[in-house]
Amino acid sequence: MKRVVVGLSGGVDSSVAAYLLQEQGYEVIGLFMKNWHDDSVTISNECPWLEDSNDALLVAEKLGIPFQTVDLSEEYKEKIVDYMFKEYEQGRTPNPDVLCNREIKFDVFMKIAMSLGADYVATGHYCRKGIIEQDGKEIYQLLAGKDDNKDQSYFLCQLSQEQLSKALFPIGELTKPEVREIAAKLDLITAEKKDSQGLCFIGKVRLPDFLQQQLQPKEGIIIEVPEEATIFNLETPQFSSEEEIFAFESRNRDYSNEIGRTVGKHQGAHYFTKGQRKGLNVGGTKEGLYVIETDVEKNIIYTGQGANHPGLFKKALFIKKDEIHWIREDLTLQPNETMEVMARIRYRQPLQKATLHQFKNGMYVVFNEPQSAITEGQFVAWHKNDEVLGSGVIS
């Protein structure tokens, strides 16, 4: 009988995942990951992880499976939290959820599961795993979940063949309503529980609050750049290679104070991210202001009016060589090779037509249509049909 350790988060998805594995004849063990307990940064008096671990325990009891809590807060702090601060200080916007899966759930957690003699680790993610055979060797595929509304394959876009080989996604074939229905039939405490929002670790803390406690505020100015500014209508220089064209299309524009007017103040450019419109607190403009660029060195935020402001859009992005990740290692591009794909630059963004162009020092993802708020530090993931082939950090 194969043994599988399921990460019970105290939510409905992982509860039903555990039940389905039981039904499929696995020996199931429930493990709750405690990733955070630094009281100095928990803002609300609610202690979400206690409540969640309690729910996870009740689910395990109901299903009659062994249960324990593992404390991964040390690893979490080092691998996720410290990385987040480093990224924010450099004016990049990290994606803790993608990283949490690569570094914690399918690494630290997976090692613990294996030490318990597990054959597999299972989570309540809405995605599926495929297996194809090539030259007598098994190749693992990461496929989108059946529920278009809830597909979470993006969050797993950094997994490796090795990690996928030991992963199971029991609810990938179901939709959220079907999952809730199963939980209700079984009378699980999590059946009606709302989906968790906020970071995958700090429970009910909002990201800006969390950051503000760690990164010192420093006052700076907010500049509004008009859409008719010359910077958006520069003549395209002559280029001698495709690589130079893509470098030009993916570059950050060089804004300066002169091209706009000061419309307000902020408490630190490092708290803001491209495409953001909340939290600027600047009124009196015809359309809402969006962040089009942050300059953490000079502590300036550049903004533009409306979702169609030219400062938000770019046609290409670059991934450094060592930040390109292929789930399907067999499809890795060699220098000067290209591949047509569907790509997304954030979770829940509809897939966009794009072409990958591999060069010696990295890869350009060139979109058919300009994309809004391409953000450094976030992940771009590329697909063929419903399979995620790879991903990379936007540089």
Image (cartoon, grey):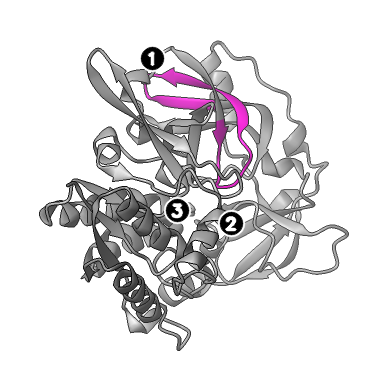
Q: Please name whichever residue, 54 or 333, is drawn nearer the observer in this view of the structure.
A: 54
Question: Could you tell me which residue is drawn at 51 percent across and 57 percent down?
Answer: 179
Q: Please name whichever residue, 18 or 392, is drawn nearer the observer in this view of the structure.
A: 18
Q: Name the residue tied to disc 1.
A: 335
Q: Name the residue tied to disc 3.
A: 94
Magenta-colored span:
343-365
Tell me where residue 331 sits by quadrant: top left
- The x, y position of residue 80, in whole percent, is 33, 59
The answer to whether any part of residue 384 appears in the image is yes
Q: Establish if 254 lies above or below 45.
A: above
Q: Is residue 64 left or right of residue 335?
A: left
Q: Main secondary structure of the magenta part?
A: strand
| Residue sitting at the far bottom | 45
Q: CA distance from mark 1 to mark 2?
A: 45 Å
Q: Please name whichever residue, 345 or 12, is drawn nearer the observer in this view of the structure.
A: 12
- In the drawing, what numbered circle is on residue 177? 2
Q: Amino acid at mark 1?
A: Pro
Element under label 3?
loop
